[in-house]
Image (tube, rainbow, N blue to C red):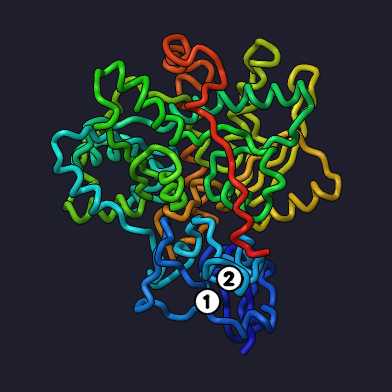
Amino acid sequence: MAKYVCQVCGYVFEGDFESLPEDWVCPVCGVKKEFFEKAEKALREEAVYIEVDDDNPSIARDESKCVKCGNCKSVCRFKQGVYGHYDIQKCKCKTVCVDCGQCSIACPSGAIGYKKDYHILKNMMKNQDKVFVFQTAPSARVALAEEFGGERGEICTGKMVSALRKLGANYVFDTNFGADLTIMEEANELVQRLESRKNLPMFTSCCPAWVKFAEIFYPEKLHLLSTCKSPIAMLTSMIKTYWAEKMNIDSQKIVVVAITPCTAKKAEAQLFDYDFALPVRELADWMREEKINFSSLEEGEFDSIFGAGSGAGMIFGTSGGVMEAALRTAHYFITGKNLERIEFKNVRSLDGFVESTVAIGRKKIKVAVVSGLVNVRKLLNDIDKGKKYHFIEVMACLGGCLGGGGQPKNLVTPYEEIRKLRSQSIYNIDKASKVRLCHENPLIKQLYSEFLHTYGNKLLHRSYQDRSEILGN
């Protein structure tokens, strides 16, 4: 029987595809029939599902739940461009994985899910000598409510903060502050590269799945990645240095827990100094275990001094947001003036790719925004053929963090619609923010005045590793 594969999400339809009605859509991502292609014979001859190694830090597989649908392998191959781009026989491991978790979103039976860590954290929280600091990523607050019957894209920031306090958080900070800090460093880095005309195009570096993808498949491009750590990693560094000193807390006693839309953050946590990364679905499971009634929670507030981020930091959660936030601040760094209209709607896209030319002062900057790693392959191929850009935002998951592998699953509402609703909520928060520019955040100014003093502090930057030996070539 013929198989047809969705070229957006990798869903496999097996049966009489031609007889489906014209208005039929993919049950996973909601795109139309035209986005399906007939699967190659080779695909049908391979094992149906993709293996997940036991030591994978981000995702886990439960064989007993597998229904052999093939969605996981199709997503990894056609949406993320990972499976099928290496020879299993040559690899030092069974599979090559970038930890994005999109296979877990596509899995209808729950056979693939996140690697559970919250029970370890719960036991650790019995230690009264530790200080537990939670931070919440931008797109988590427009998704968590879905786990408890809320509307798609419902904004639940205050309830999420209250839930974390009920779970035992001593302090709750906003990763949006970390996003603001990332932009301060990244926009400065972009301006320096533009002036020197070296290491261009500059690629964003806040998505750990993209970074690992580059380290494995494109190590020759690593010098083009921004050296900035991710917002979560930057904020963690500030918590364990600047904040610990101000609060007179021994940094060794601080345990940082990140609430994230992303399973790949679990792997990133092992590289940097935050202790736990809990995807939204994992947080929801923990809350249900503790019998927390989400709808009855009061609106909580973040703790100072890392409790206030800008609207620009908020839009990190959607594809194009990092680019737009960086351009808002780069404009100030280049011209000394803030934009009259700060929105760059021409870099906003949930479809996987958009490019534009942006004028900043006398400079014309060619930019691109790409999400979904299979689209990254196409872009890098175009660059190798001579296409020129100055700045490129990359997110491993289609639509950016709001479509991350740790976000709530839904097998009823098309993901295309869910991404739009979550994205709209993110931009609504930005519009309602009193501060919409990272460099205008008064707490960011305070941090640079009191502690960082200048750009390029090693606490905020990182290096990269050539991991291509995994491929065995």
The quadrant where residue 222 appears? top right
Q: Which residue is mark 1?
A: 70
Label 2 Cα neighbours within 10 Å, binned few <14 / some 14-19 / many ≥20: many
Please tell me which residue is depicted at 53% across the width and 80% down the height of the picture. 48
Q: Nearer the viewer, residue 240 or 310?
A: 240
Q: Is residue 180 visible?
A: no
Three-letter amino acid code at the position of disc 1: Gly
Q: Quadrant of the C terminus?
A: bottom right
Report, in whole angstroms, how far the alpha carbon at label 2 lies from the one at label 1.
Answer: 6 Å
Please tell me which residue is depicted at 36% across the width and 41% down the height of the picture. 258
Question: Are the residues tagged 2 and 1 within 8 Å (C-beta)?
Answer: yes
Secondary structure type for disc 1: loop
* Relative side of 419 to 45, left or right: left
Secondary structure type for disc 2: helix
Q: Position of residue 420 (x, y in %)?
A: 53, 48
In the displayed structure, would residue 424 be above or below residue 10? above
Which residue is outermost to the right?
Answer: 386
Three-letter amino acid code at the position of disc 2: Ser
* Relative side of 162 to 126, left or right: right
Q: Is residue 161 visible?
A: yes
* Relative side of 296 to 353, left or right: left
Q: Quadrant of the N terminus?
A: bottom right
Residue 28 circle label: none
Q: Position of residue 19 (x, y in %)?
A: 64, 83
Residue 74 circle label: 2
Please tell me which residue is depicted at 51% across the width and 15% down the height of the picture. 440
In the displayed structure, would residue 114 be above or below residue 266? below
Q: Nearer the viewer, residue 254 or 345?
A: 254
In the displayed structure, would residue 416 be above or below residue 230? below
Q: Position of residue 214 (x, y in %)?
A: 63, 49
Q: Position of residue 334 (x, y in %)?
A: 70, 16
